[in-house]
Amino acid sequence: MKTVLIVEDDPINARVFSKILTKRGGLVVRHTENVDEVMEIARTGGADIILMDVSLSHSVFQGKPVDGIRITQMLKEDPQTAELPVVLVTAHAMEGDRENFLQQSGANGYISKPVVDHQQFVNQVVGLLQGEDASEVPQSS
């Protein structure tokens, strides 16, 4: 069973994502917004993919507030976790944001909230788990 780690500060969103991914995707879901926990889970192989909320309002790392972009950068900079697929999830999807967020963070894909098409959401996550490029933007490595 593949495990999805949801990094999300809104418990309702976390529950909705969790339900969709377990029911439709048959995936195991973990949830935390604690940055140390995220890093620990990532380093110990406790997740196969991470869904990262971009605007985490409560997350702090080493005494400083961090957002999902920063946490993704940290994951991508660490050789131990660099290969772990990270999908940014955000409600702030203006034209051009997707490219900026992907470029800034090094994330593997991008999903905008609210998630309307549940099946497409599951397909995107499962696709990335299988090593497909799930974003609609060509990735430059």
Image (cartoon, helix red, strand yellow):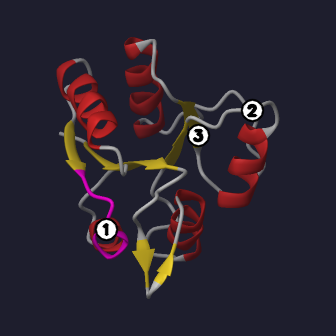
Residue occupying the point 42% across, 35% down: 130
Q: Is residue 60 left or right of residue 38?
A: right
Residue 5 coordinates in the image, percent (x, y): 30, 50
Whichever of labels 3 and 1 marks the residue nearer the N terminus, that label is: 1
Query: Residue 34: which disc?
Result: 1
Q: Quadrant of residue 80?
A: bottom left
Q: Is mark 2 on a helix, strand or loop?
A: loop
Question: What's the residue type where badge 1 is placed?
Answer: Asn
Q: Decide: is 64 above or below 6.
A: below
Question: What's the residue type where badge 2 is placed?
Answer: Met
Q: Decide: is 88 above or below 94.
A: below
Q: Decide: is 11 above or below 38.
A: above
Number of numbered discs: 3
Q: In this view, does 33 lie to the left or right of 94?
A: left
Q: What element carries label 1?
A: loop
Q: Give the range drawn in magenta.
A: 31-37
Residue 96 coordinates in the image, percent (x, y): 82, 37
- The residue lying furthest to the bottom in this view is 62
Query: Residue 10: which disc?
Result: none
Q: Which quadrant holds the N terminus? A: top left
Which residue corresponds to mark 2? 94
The crowding category of the residue bearing disc 3, from other C-alpha atoms within 10 Å (few below 14, some 14 to 19, many at least 20), is many
Q: Is mark 3 on a helix, strand or loop?
A: strand
